[in-house]
Image (cartoon, rainbow, N blue to C red):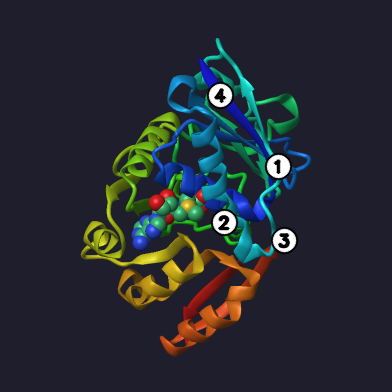
Amino acid sequence: MWWRLTLPCPPELEESLVWKLTDLGLHRHAVQHAPETPDRKTLLVWLPKPEWPEPQRRELIASLQPLAEPFGLSLPDGHWDDVADEDWSLSWKQHWQADPVGAGLLILPAWLEVQPEHADRLVIKMDPGSAFGTGSHPTTRLCLEALEQSPPLGSLVADLGCGSGVLGLAALGLGAESVVAADTDSLAVRATADNRGLNDRSEAELQVALGSVETLSELLAPRRADLLLCNILAPVIEALSPGFEGLLQPDGRALLSGLLVDQAPRLKEVLGGLGWLVTVEAAQGRWGLLEIRRR
Ligand SMILES: C[S@@+](CC[C@H](N)C(=O)[O-])C[C@H]1O[C@@H](n2cnc3c(N)ncnc32)[C@H](O)[C@@H]1O
């Protein structure tokens, strides 16, 4: 007894759409894409049929439409299917696939086996639940690729806005000594803890708690991190940035993503004013990543 919305999802809109749905308490959603065409995605949303007559479904679409405007896009047309007997919790799992990232990483939905062509890759198992961060979003990929290019060997890593924990788990796989992680969303904290178990990591290796900069600082005390990972939207990064210095060793670095390329100049100016130097810049489509170090 479900309505299933199928909506073509431009990559720029994925994050906002997933957040909006989660904010509305609609957790039964999935973003489908084939690994070879990461830019062609489809958003699927399942709604209990009795609670969602047509006017409510139209209202939902109307509330998603404004999310496209900041990108100069309009929300693509979607369609609703009556999927009377579909078990959404199984259906959304069918849409995930093993996702090779960078030269040697593989994001693997926990219920799948590693295929022979990916046997040499470092596997990060994910049961993404409703927390953002399966590895398919360009900002997550940018962070994963940057991690892979400069592996955090022996580092203490702080993962701010950990989502599903994908970045912290990748950091551990790439040689980090330990990770502390925080997120303001309790579902993300739970997903990170669940994914820690899936990847056979201990609580000593990956500690996660509800919160933000302060929480990370408490988890790190009396130490500071060698590497800060922060993949959150640009205005949030800007608001949190005065706290970065207190989280990092003087010679530490941070990987910041979640920003649009257009937002980079302003963010660089703010970070420069706080004594940070941008040492690496990368982009995928309209999304950007900055690596920063103390000047
Ligand atoms: C774009 S997701 C990134 C998830 C994951 N780290 C990744 O790279 O795929 C951003 C995450 O930041 C969290 N978040 C948003 N504002 C935050 C804040 N002020 N402090 C900590 N986490 C925050 C959200 O709940 C969300 O899980």
Residue at (65, 63) in percent of width and height: 71
3D distance between C-alphas at marks 2 and 1: 14 Å
Label 2 Cα crowd, 10 Å radius (few <14 / some 14-19 / many 20+): many
* Residue 3 - label: 4
Figure check: 38 above or below 231:
above
Percent x, y for residue 38?
72, 44
Amino acid on which the number 1 mark rests in the picture: Asp
Query: Which residue in the structure is indicated by mark 1?
Result: 77
Residue at (52, 45) in percent of width and height: 18
Query: Which residue in the structure is indicated by mark 2?
Result: 67
In front of the other: 105 or 14: 14
Dot 4 or dot 1, earlier in sequence: 4
* Residue 285 - label: 3
Which of the 4 image quadrants contains residue 32? top right
Q: Nearer the viewer, mark 4 or mark 3?
A: 4
Dot 4 or dot 3, earlier in sequence: 4
| 73 sits to left or right of 127 | right
| 152 sits to left or right of 157 | right
